[in-house]
Image: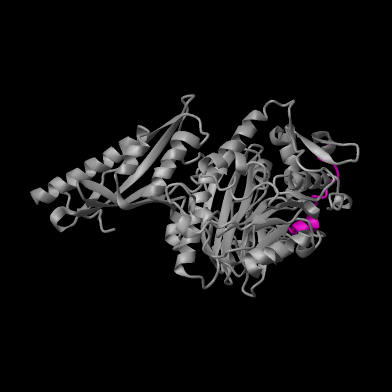
Amino acid sequence: MNQSLARERSYGVSAMNGLDPEKYVRRDGDGYLYVVDHHVYLDEDVYKAELDHVFKQQWVYLGMEQEVARPGTFKTTYLADVGVVLVRDEDGKLHVYENVCLHRGAKLVRKRCGAATSFNCIYHSWSYDLKGALLAVPMPAGFRDTFRKEDYRLSELPRVETYAGMVFASYRADIEPLVEYLGEFTKYLDEILEGGNVEFIGYQRYHVSANWKLFVENTVDGYHPGLLHTPIMRDRGGYLYKPGQGHNYKFRNGHGLLQWPVTAVPKEDWDPEFDLPITYCVSRKDGWDYVSNIFPNVMVLYIEDIITIRQLIPRGVNEVDVITYNFGRPGESEEVRRHRAWAVSSQFGVAGVASLDDKLAMEAVQAGATARYSDTVLMRGKLSDSVGDVTSEISLRGFYEKWVDCFAGPEAQTRGKA
Amino acid sequence: MTASALAPAVERNPESFYWKQEIREYIRRLGGLLDNFEMGMFVEEFADDGRYQLIPRENLEGGYPVCLIDDTKPRLRYRQRLIEKHWHYEKFRELRMLSPVSVDVGKGGGAANAITNFVIFRTDDDGTSKLHVCGTFQDEFVRQDRWRIKNRKAILDTYLPTQAIILPP
């Protein structure tokens, strides 16, 4: 009885658990999506279908290579609703296992992170090596004759790949290589993360009582910052950018990106009583700021000095955990490092000037969505375009086009192609 | 931060005893200001170069500088304006439950360090009460015209806060 998920389990369900995804969106005469039904935030059936079709059929971000930099280091996290352990074995290879003992189903690795030479279940002391093999079973004589340790391996996800230091895994053995899945988006990751050559400077974690998709929507919604957040800032031209100053892209596979020029305020003009630390920038004077999503559950932000990755872990139809990973550049000065940390501490997280209001807005949408016969309107920008003004809703439409395609099987994966 | 949980249970120096009592009362009063939504009065308790940090314990222990709040006194005033005028939250009340305070007072009574554990409950407008956050204050006080906050580091044990942290713990 080999437990390999790749061989024994199939998540290639072709129907959305009997539901039709097209029922949840509205399209114009040319087939362009522009309305999303509120049921996508509310229905348990939709959520359960998402776990199988969206999360378990795509590349899903689990963390950073530098969190498991040395052989034997591990972290535990979730891929959708499944607890997993990411570990680097003695040979330096990354593995992702379902975090469960094969014997009686106890959670195997109970620490958030650490280093180990083997994993031992607390219940009956079954132990596994870092490559997933069953090492030892106490009192083996008591098992029936056909029991062989060699038949048991931890349930391993068939695909684990990295890009720019980000670790992704997939339940789908035949999914396209990660670099192809990311496509054009890789050039932005190359710029923001410099091939993974970034230094971790801390986590922020919090919970939002809203459907996970509302968090994605909020992050790549270039329409709201100048409206929801502007009252909390002195007039810097309507937040960090004005309409027409940047772009909003959708890419193949549902990835999206907003960009606008760096608009650093000179430090001498910066007033600590009125201006946010984010609005003066000490690490660069020009270039672009980026806010982006990689379908389905990870967002990469580069705003002035802030370099942040956000990982979403859905916890139910209206609950999502948010983990943010924040970075600096190796070798940067104390001043730059201090300012990066200060900017992200001020701006983001559960007490952050902007993220706090974002959280409240998402929770307001979740509460409002109980008006089940209303819809979410995504009509800013020309529906047929794959690039538009930064305040358009192009990347959001791209996200939902991919979301629909997730339920239609692999052959539809290119339908949302920009 | 030198306040020790192993400090003598009974303070035999009357002056030091008095100062420690002052600090304990001061910490209790600071909590009361926030419970009563007196953010402006709380901010004015800081020395001009005072600082408030709310840092997740995992970042503190990992040596990472990212916080959830990292405010100078001007930034605290800014936060006060957000709370009073701009943030879009629904009405709530908070209750700060503070542990006994461990205090060290410097010679001459010009500075003091203190450690206090905190638990904060939040009651929403509909009357639902929940544990909000808990952790530990590491405080540094200076005596100016009276005691002022030089540094308050609030170390957050709550791993995954569920509600927005509007008032500083």
**In this view of the protein, can residue A105 be seen by the observer?**
no
Magenta stretch: includes residue A4: yes
Q: Is residue B138 visible?
A: yes
Residue extending furthest toward the front: A269
- Residue A3 in the magenta stretch? The answer is yes
Q: Horizontally, is A16 left or right of A202 in the view?
A: right
Magenta residues span: A1-18
Image spot of residue A25 (x, y percent) = 81, 36
Is A281 in front, or is B31? A281
Coloring basis for residues: one colour
Q: Residue at x 73, y 65 (%)?
A: A187
Q: Quadrant of residue A360?
A: top right
Corner quadrant of residue A304: bottom right
Q: Position of residue B113 (x, y in %)?
A: 25, 54
Above or below for A308 versus A41: below
Residue B11 is left or right of residue A115, and the answer is left
Q: Is residue A41 above or below residue A278?
A: above
Q: Main secondary structure of the magenta part?
A: loop
In front of the other: B94 or B143: B143
Q: Quadrant of the N terminus of chain B?
A: bottom left
